[in-house]
Image (spheres, helix red, strand yellow):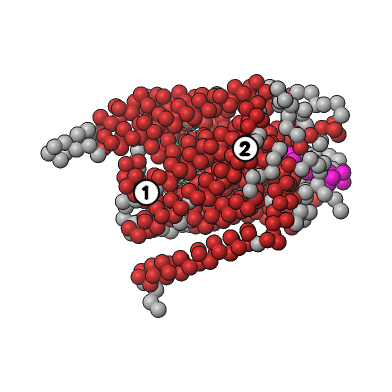
């Protein structure tokens, strides 16, 4: 495969499309995966929790 | 600062500062016939001054192990003050260049007072000085609170904060002397660029090391934005600044890129600097401080994740909208345009998420100027991104490009979004950071808010008007096909708008000065009697009138 302008353009126009679609699907599936919901809900409360302003020591 | 360091860290600090001093000396000697030499002296002074300061504190008692029970906030405190100082400098110079555009004689034939040298002092001063320090200071604060882990050590945060400010000083002083590699927002020369890479790698390492010790399993979304900011800025910075200096004793270098590749690399950098410096990092701020101040969790956590990935995927491809109608291949322009338009979706998802979080807490927005700063920032973020997506359409860009419309868009984003979210976040942590019960004067916060809002509105409307008039005058033809207006005609038409813009900018600058005064007075207020009790206050916003 020659490494010329047309090849590079052809590659970016085809592969570029597919990998962005794939990444979007992964992001969406992960976000809406039912078992992830609990973690998200807890994380969302993080800034508003009224707790001691200290690091956790264990 | 030095008392916080363990003995081993003090020795490390001396080693680093000593090495910095030696590098400065080498630059001063190698570049003695060049402007590089002057920067060598600045670096030498910074290294030597720091070295002596640490040496004098070397035998001070070591910090107690108790410190590990608290977050390490000293770098955040210093960062907040540096943020305000750079705000005053950067916006002060912004006001000055705005005045120069209205009254160009004010350069008084002094080279370093010329528009071309002062303009980058403004842009770097506000973006890197003001914005960058705000991002570093708040990221350390947010990172520790959301992971419940203390920063990994006491020395690397200082290295990042102070090293970064050294970069800013080298940059700004270089512009005044006429040093620039003439890439917008990436003007500093090769040696400053290398230094920034070192600082940035340490910054990212702090993030990773703190996250590795986190207590919370899930990494709160604000950190994702901060990390995207750090990581992507590193990539952009390294690629766009690839250059070969003409010699080690010279400040001048030549870029690895030329022609249209150079232009595309520069605007890939430029637009992603907007995306990851002026947007992602500040979204991190918004996603933490806005829910916290409002006392309500973010409206939709899932939406925040989707907008995160949307912004990260799409911004990367939008840079070519800066190069419409140039030698850049047509399809690349179209690609940039298409991605810019779709970009509106994740952008509005973030702005909407913020506003929907406030839905039900509007009484707080009404009573609390700090929360109002943040609410307004979200609104301006929505306006600016809508405008950006619109301007990226090639036909629209043919009107807006090269005109003040771009400047209006920039400052709707910079004043309305970046500066407002920064001031809001800053006010919300200043009392707890400096262990005071409240901000010195709630009234002055209110004054600042109205100065900032009216300044932004005046600035942006002046530029929108002037930009559209400019664009239209440049494309009005006579019946015989010639241009109706000369360039000078359009310049004369701009004059009143330039005066209005300078006035709006002045109001905004006065607001920043008010903030500086208010914060200094807060620090000078007596500390509350029981120091221990004060440690716990950040959960609640400071007392509000009418609450
Ligand atoms: C006191 C407030 C401010 C004033 C008076 C002001 C004024 C100006 C002026 C006169 C210019 C040059 C416009 C031209 O060349 O036609 C400019 C450019 C710029 N300013 Fe500001 N500014 C202010 C605040 C800010 C802030 C807070 C930021 C960023 C956070 C910012 C970012 C920029 C940028 C990025 C540019 C370059 C725009 C471009 O090249 O398209 N400014 N400003
Ligand atoms: C969806 C989001 C956005 C899009 C699609 C967008 C699009 C654009 C477009 C088309 C231009 C004009 C390019 C030209 O004609 O030369 C521009 C310029 C600019 N935008 Fe945006 N924008 C967006 C958001 C923002 C935000 C949030 C900021 C933050 C402060 C910002 C800062 C800038 C700056 C600094 C410039 C001037 C660059 C220069 O020429 O020096 N933009 N943007």
Q: Is mark 2 within 8 Å of ligand 2?
A: no
Of circles 1 and 2, the one toward us is 2
Q: In which quadrant will I find the C terminus of chain B?
A: top right
Name the residue rendered at 47%, 29% in the picture. B457
Q: Nearer the viewer, residue B524 or B381?
A: B381
Q: Nearer the viewer, residue B285 or B540?
A: B540
User: Circle 2 sits in a helix, a strand or a loop, which is it?
Assistant: loop
Judging from the image, mark 1 belongs to the subunit labelled B
In this rendering, position of residue B285 left or right of residue B456: right
Q: In which quadrant will I find the N terminus of chain B?
A: top right
Residue A23 within the segment the image draws in magenta: no
What span is colored magenta in the figure? Answer: B65-77
In this rendering, position of residue B362 left or right of residue B341: right
Judging from the image, mark 2 belongs to the subunit labelled B
Name the residue rendered at 44%, 38% in the picture. B409
Residue receiving disc 1? B393
Residue receiving disc 2? B359
């Amino acid at each position: 495969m020659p490494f010329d302008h047309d090849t590079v353009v052809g590659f970016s126009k085809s592969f570029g499309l597919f990998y962005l679609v794939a990444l979007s699907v992964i992001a969406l599936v992960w976000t809406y995966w039912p078992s992830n919901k609990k973690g998200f809900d807890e994380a969302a409360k993080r800034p508003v929790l009224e707790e001691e302003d200290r690091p956790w020591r264990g | 600062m030095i008392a916080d360091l363990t003995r081993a860290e003090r020795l490390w600090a001396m080693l680093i500062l000593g090495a910095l001093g030696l590098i400065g000396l080498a630059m001063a000697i190698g570049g003695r016939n060049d402007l590089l030499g002057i920067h060598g002296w600045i670096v030498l002074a910074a290294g030597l001054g720091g070295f002596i300061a640490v040496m004098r504190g070397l035998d001070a008692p070591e910090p107690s192990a108790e410190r590990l029970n608290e977050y390490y906030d000293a770098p955040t405190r210093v960062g907040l003050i540096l943020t305000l100082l750079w705000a005053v400098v950067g916006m002060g110079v912004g006001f000055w260049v705005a005045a120069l555009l209205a009254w160009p004689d004010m350069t008084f034939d002094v080279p370093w007072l010329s528009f071309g040298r002062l303009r980058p002092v403004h842009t770097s001063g506000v973006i890197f000085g003001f914005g960058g320090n705000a991002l570093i200071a708040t990221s350390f604060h947010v990172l520790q609170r959301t992971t419940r882990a203390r920063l990994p050590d006491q020395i690397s945060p200082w290295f990042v904060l102070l090293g970064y400010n050294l970069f800013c000083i080298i940059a700004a002083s270089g512009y005044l002397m006429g040093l620039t590699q003439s890439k917008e927002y990436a003007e500093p020369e090769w040696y400053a660029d290398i230094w920034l890479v070192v600082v940035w790698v340490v910054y990212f390492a702090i993030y990773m090391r703190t996250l590795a010790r986190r207590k919370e399993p899930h990494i709160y979304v604000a950190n994702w934005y901060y990390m995207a900011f750090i990581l992507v800025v590193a990539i952009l910075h390294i690629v766009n600044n690839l250059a070969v200096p003409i010699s080690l004793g010279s400040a001048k270098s030549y870029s690895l890129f030329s022609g249209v590749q150079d232009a595309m690399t520069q605007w890939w950098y430029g637009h992603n600097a907007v995306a990851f410096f002026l947007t992602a990092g500040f979204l991190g701020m918004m996603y933490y401080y806005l829910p916290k101040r409002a006392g309500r969790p973010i409206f939709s956590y899932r939406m925040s994740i989707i907008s995160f990935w949307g912004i990260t995927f799409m911004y990367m491809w939008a840079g070519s909208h800066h190069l419409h109608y140039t030698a850049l291949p047509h399809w690349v322009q179209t690609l940039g345009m298409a991605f810019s338009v779709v970009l509106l979706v994740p952008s509005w998802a973030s702005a909407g998420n913020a506003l929907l979080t406030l839905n039900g807490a509007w009484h707080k927005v009404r009573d609390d100027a700090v929360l109002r700063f943040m609410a307004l920032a979200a609104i301006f973020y929505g306006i600016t991104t809508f405008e950006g997506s619109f301007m990226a359409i090639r036909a629209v860009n043919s009107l807006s490009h090269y005109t003040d419309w771009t400047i209006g868009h920039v400052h709707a984003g910079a004043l309305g979004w970046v500066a407002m979210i920064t001031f809001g976040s800053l006010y919300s942590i200043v009392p707890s950071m400096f262990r005071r019960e409240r901000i010195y004067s709630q009234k002055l916060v209110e004054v600042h808010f109205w100065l900032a809002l009216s300044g932004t509105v005046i600035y942006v409307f002046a530029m929108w008007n002037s930009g559209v008039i400019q664009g239209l005058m440049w494309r009005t033809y006579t019946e015989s096909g010639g241009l109706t207006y000369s360039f000078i005609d359009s310049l004369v038409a701009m004059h009143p708008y330039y005066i209005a813009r300078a006035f709006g900018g002045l109001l905004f600058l006065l607001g920043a000065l008010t903030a500086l005064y208010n914060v200094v007075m807060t620090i000078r207020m007596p500390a509350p009697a029981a120091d221990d009790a004060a440690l716990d206050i950040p959960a609640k916003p400071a007392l509000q009138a009418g609450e």
